[in-house]
Image: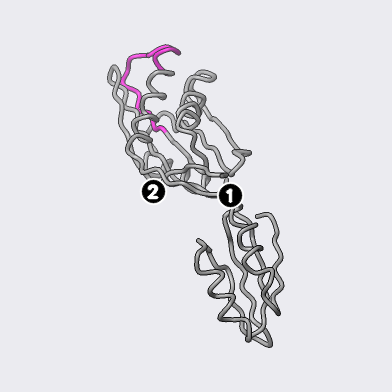
Amino acid sequence: MNEFFTIEAPSEGLFKEKGSKFLAYAYPVESEADVKNRLEELRKQYYDARHHCYAYIIGLKKQAYRANDDGEPNHSAGDPILGQIRSMNLTNCLVVVVRYFGGTKLGVGGLIAAYKTAAEEALKQAKIRTIYSQTTFDLTFSYEATAEVERALAGFDIHYLEKNYTDSCQFVGLLKDEDVPLLEAKLELTEGVRLTFAAD
């Protein structure tokens, strides 16, 4: 089963070290545009903070990811944050850690530990949800086949994108990858049905 994990809703964490405050925010995100919007919100809210360091992973194959140190020493902030997202096997997740400098330098080792801990605190507060790799289906059928089609579809967890009723009926929706062969088997003997799939 192709299952993936993300966070259900935004969550927060806090870590303090030698007068510095590290405010951590975790967000579910779907795109790099979502990331940009969240960063802009936090930069406006915490305009007087010294650093807004962040990391994210996006995509079911975790194909888009980035770590940003925002002026901290190289690899001392973004990478530890990214490491926490990876350690929880999450995707579609952004973590931003806002730092208020307390007057005492922490050194690279201290920064790595602080950013890691702050990110961990935010993610520990998050509710994790499972998402599944899905396939888009396009199902066209005659009105005469409606009862049989609805019986066949009843047992599946389907997210419908469209339902059209014209000369014939058309349903477009998302189905878990693992359910594709099962749906095909249920509908293959039904008269007046055309079922096609496209990878989502």
Q: The residue tagged with tag 2: helix, strand or loop?
A: loop
Taking depth in this image into account, of 110 and 182 the one nearest to the observer is: 182
Under mark 1, the amino acid is Ser
Q: Residue at image x 41%, y 42%?
A: 42
- The stretch drawn in magenta includes residue 109: yes
State the extent of the magenta-drawn residues as a range: 97-111
Tell us which disc is closer to us: 2 or 1.
Answer: 1
Q: Residue 41's x, y, as percent?
A: 43, 47
Taking depth in this image into account, of 118 and 173 the one nearest to the observer is: 173
Give the labeled residue for mark 1. Answer: 133
For this view, does 134 lie left or right of residue 157? right
Q: Is residue 92 above or below residue 99?
A: below
Q: Quadrant of the N terminus?
A: top right
Q: Is residue 92 above or below residue 100?
A: below
Q: Is residue 82 above or below residue 129?
A: above
Q: Residue at image x 35%, y 42%?
A: 11
Q: Residue at image x 52%, y 40%?
A: 91
Q: Residue 53's x, y, as percent?
A: 47, 31
Give the labeled residue for mark 2. Answer: 9
For this view, does 115 lie left or right of residue 17? right
